[in-house]
Image: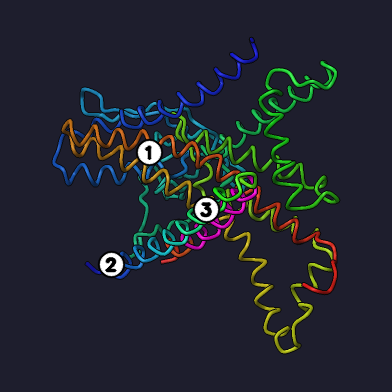
């Protein structure tokens, strides 16, 4: 009975966190109520764009104080730069991007979520005609908001699965506690994703990657819906890395049969083989590219739509329009919970499909 | 209003993807109604096909 309540409370917690986040995001938009409608719309647009970006501090929320100042509530994160030597400092030096940070005789400024070098304490960012900064950019290895969340998810996953493994040891191979929650999911990934797509013979080698990517994408997506409001998977660099790993594993586990189907397709006339080879080769790059775009675009689009509808509550500012947008936002938030797991599932299934193609054994000549 | 072609293009992409995913969903429903015992397999195939269309649609939307 205790275990059941444990499971239930986890589900409830995840559910509640989702709605809290949008409540909080809405809260900081309240300040936009004053001013004309057009003003509100541009501010809303900026707010949404800002929300989608990575940042150097772990911002919780901001509000306007009584004296008209904008206050930010956030944790600073370490900034690591390589600019003729390693420079490490906390992002609080930037004062939320409003001030120039001085480190070891160099001056840095944040401009559109990127760090640039400026001349002095009152240095300015120079722009070209396309509004791109022309200042020098130091090599940036900072622990930004996204990196911090990736570390956090790493720790969470590690402890979750360590506890699961320990519970098997303790209870004669019976899962206890968190293992009860995870075992069906792990089995699902094995029986419904890995074995049908890769095959009985080879699937074991790929299970570790498939499980890691499934749980990583899922949990990261869920965190994107929580009040801390960090969206790792709508950063294209993260999805690029995930897709790149899939590509590398596929390429290195490709057997003779796989390469033969790419460069010298059996069963078609020779001129056709020559035409098919570059297309098939291009196909190997397009597959991981589509993986990258799919995850990135789904999460980004979901966040933009959801935030826009929440923003509409404040633009309408009357009880009919606002309550309609509220209901719409509520339903969409539930849909986003589904999308979070669906995208993790799709990513895993397609990865498994590609691995399956790479290790497929040579079967009879009749295709 | 210089971006009308872009907007119309985005609309066309969404219509195309919508028709595609709608047809997949409809066919999957029919298939499940005929063979309820194959629900799991049909759903997997349906999701993969839908994801492939969606991937193309997103690539087109973002590649303007």
Query: On the rendered image, what quadrant is the N terminus of chain B found in?
Result: bottom left
**In the image shown, does A295 or A101 lie closer to the viewer?**
A295
Left or right? Give the position of B54 relative to A150: left
Seen at 35% across and 27% down, the residue is A23
Q: Which residues are magenta?
A: B40-58
Secondary structure, mark 2, is loop
Residue A53: percent from left, percent from top: 44, 45
Report the disc number at residue B30. Answer: 3
Percent from the top left, x then y, of residue A107? Answer: 46, 44
- Residue A154 placement (x, y as % from top left): 65, 33
- Callout 1 environment at 10 Å: few (<14), some (14 to 19), or many (20+)? some
Front residue of A135 and A293 = A293
Furthest residue in direction left, as rendered: A36
Q: Main secondary structure of the magenta part?
A: helix
Q: Is residue A365 magenta?
A: no
Q: Which residue sits furthest top?
A: A2
Asked if A223 appears above or below A308 in the picture, the reply is above
Answer whether residue A193 is visible to the viewer in this image.
Answer: yes
Q: Quadrant of the C terminus of chain B?
A: bottom left
Residue B55: horizontal and vertical position, in percent? 52, 59
Q: Earlier in the sequence, mark 2 or mark 3?
A: 2
Residue where numbered disc 2 is placed: B3
Q: In this picture, is B26 found above or below A281? A: above
In three-dimensional space, the C-alpha distance between marks 2 and 1, rounded to whole angstroms, equals 37 Å
Instruction: Identify the residue position indicated by label 1 in the image.
Output: A99
- How far apart are the two marked residues, 3 and 1, measured between alpha carbons? 62 Å
On the picture, is A360 further left or further right than B62? right
């Amino acid at each position: 009975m205790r275990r059941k309540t444990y499971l239930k409370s986890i589900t409830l917690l995840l559910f509640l966190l989702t709605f809290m986040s949008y409540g909080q995001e809405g809260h900081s938009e309240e300040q936009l109520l004053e001013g004309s409608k057009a003003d509100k719309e541009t501010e809303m647009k900026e707010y949404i764009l800002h929300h989608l970006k990575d940042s150097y501090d772990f911002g919780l929320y901001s509000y306007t104080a009584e004296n008209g100042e904008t206050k930010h509530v956030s944790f600073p994160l370490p900034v690591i730069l390589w600019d003729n030597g390693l420079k490490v400092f906390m992002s609080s030096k930037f004062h939320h991007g409003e001030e120039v940070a001085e480190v070891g005789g160099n001056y840095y400024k944040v401009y559109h979520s990127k760090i640039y070098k400026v001349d002095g304490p009152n240095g300015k960012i120079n722009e070209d005609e396309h509004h791109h900064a022309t200042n020098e950019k130091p090599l940036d290895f900072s622990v930004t908001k996204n990196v911090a969340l990736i570390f956090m998810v790493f720790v969470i996953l590690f402890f979750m699965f360590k506890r699961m493994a320990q519970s098997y040891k303790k209870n004669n191979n019976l899962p206890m506690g968190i293992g009860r929650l995870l075992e069906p999911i792990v089995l699902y990934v094995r029986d419904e994703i890995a074995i049908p797509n890769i095959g009985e013979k080879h699937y074991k080698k790929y299970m570790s990657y498939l499980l890691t990517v499934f749980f990583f994408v899922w949990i990261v997506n869920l965190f994107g819906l929580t009040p801390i409001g960090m969206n790792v998977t709508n950063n294209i660099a993260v999805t690029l890395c995930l897709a790149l790993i899939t590509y590398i594993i596929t390429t290195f586990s490709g057997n003779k049969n796989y390469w033969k189907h790419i460069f010298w397709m059996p069963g078609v006339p020779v001129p056709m083989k020559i035409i098919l080879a570059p297309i098939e080769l291009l196909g190997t790059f397009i597959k991981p590219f589509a993986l990258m775009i799919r995850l990135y675009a789904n999460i980004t689009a979901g966040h933009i739509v959801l935030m826009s509808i929440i923003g509409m509550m404040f633009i309408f500012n009357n009880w009919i329009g606002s309550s309609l947008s509220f209901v719409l936002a509520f339903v969409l938030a539930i849909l986003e919970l589904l999308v979070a797991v669906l995208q993790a599932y799709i990513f895993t299934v397609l990865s498994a499909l590609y691995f399956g193609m790479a290790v497929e054994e040579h079967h009879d000549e009749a295709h | 209003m210089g971006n009308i072609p872009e907007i119309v293009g985005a609309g066309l992409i969404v219509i195309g993807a919508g028709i595609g995913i709608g047809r997949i969903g409809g066919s999957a429903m029919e298939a499940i109604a005929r063979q309820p015992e194959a629900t799991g397999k049909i759903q997997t195939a349906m999701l993969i096909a839908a994801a492939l269309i969606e991937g193309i649609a997103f690539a087109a939307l973002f590649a303007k």
